[in-house]
Amino acid sequence: MNEEDEAFNEIERKAKQRMEAVRAAMRGEDDDIQDYKRPWVGLTDDEQSFVFDQVKQIVDSKPFWVRFADAVEAKLKEKNT
């Protein structure tokens, strides 16, 4: 076997390895890919109260649904006048 044949065999071997890796990935067998998920961290009672107070300040004294209905009514009025 000469250098050219050896080089060709090396290229062929690498190509086969790559194709096997692609096939494994398509079958979902790729061990190199891992999902790292952080555990869920919720809000404390104090943080929930803070968020509630902030939202309450933003929407004034009207409940959200009333402000939503007002916005819909304003848009309808705009389109119909």
Image (cartoon, rainbow, N blue to C red):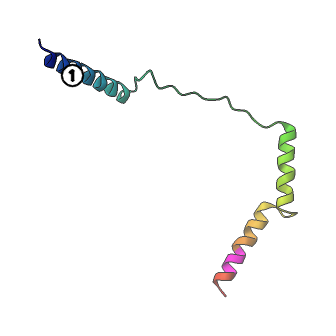
Q: Residue furthest bottom?
A: 81
Instruction: Say above or below: 27 vs 79.
Output: above
Magenta residues (range): 73-77
Q: Is residue 74 left or right of residue 45?
A: left
Q: Residue at the location (30% across, 25% down)?
A: 18
Q: Residue at the location (78% across, 61% down)?
A: 64
The magenta stretch spans residue 50:
no
Q: Mark 1: few, some, or many residues within 10 Å (few <14, many ≥20)?
A: few
Q: Is residue 18 left or right of residue 50?
A: left
Residue 2: percent from the left, percent from the top? 12, 14
Residue 75: percent from the left, percent from the top? 68, 76
Instruction: Say above or below: 27 vs 48.
Output: above
Residue 3: percent from the left, percent from the top? 16, 16
Q: Which quadrant of the figure has residue 10? A: top left
Q: Main secondary structure of the magenta part?
A: helix
Instruction: Say above or below: 79 vs 54.
Output: below
Reading the image, the residue beneath label 1 is 12
Q: Is residue 10 left or right of residue 61?
A: left
Report the number of numbered marks: 1
Q: What's the residue type where badge 1 is placed?
A: Glu
Q: Which quadrant of the figure has residue 25? A: top left
Q: Residue furthest front?
A: 3
Residue 1: percent from the left, percent from the top? 11, 11
Instruction: Say above or below: 16 vs 48.
Output: above
The magenta stretch spans residue 74:
yes
Camera-nearest residue between 71 and 15? 15
Camera-nearest residue between 3 and 69? 3
Q: Residue at the location (40% across, 27% down)?
A: 28
For label 1, the SS is helix
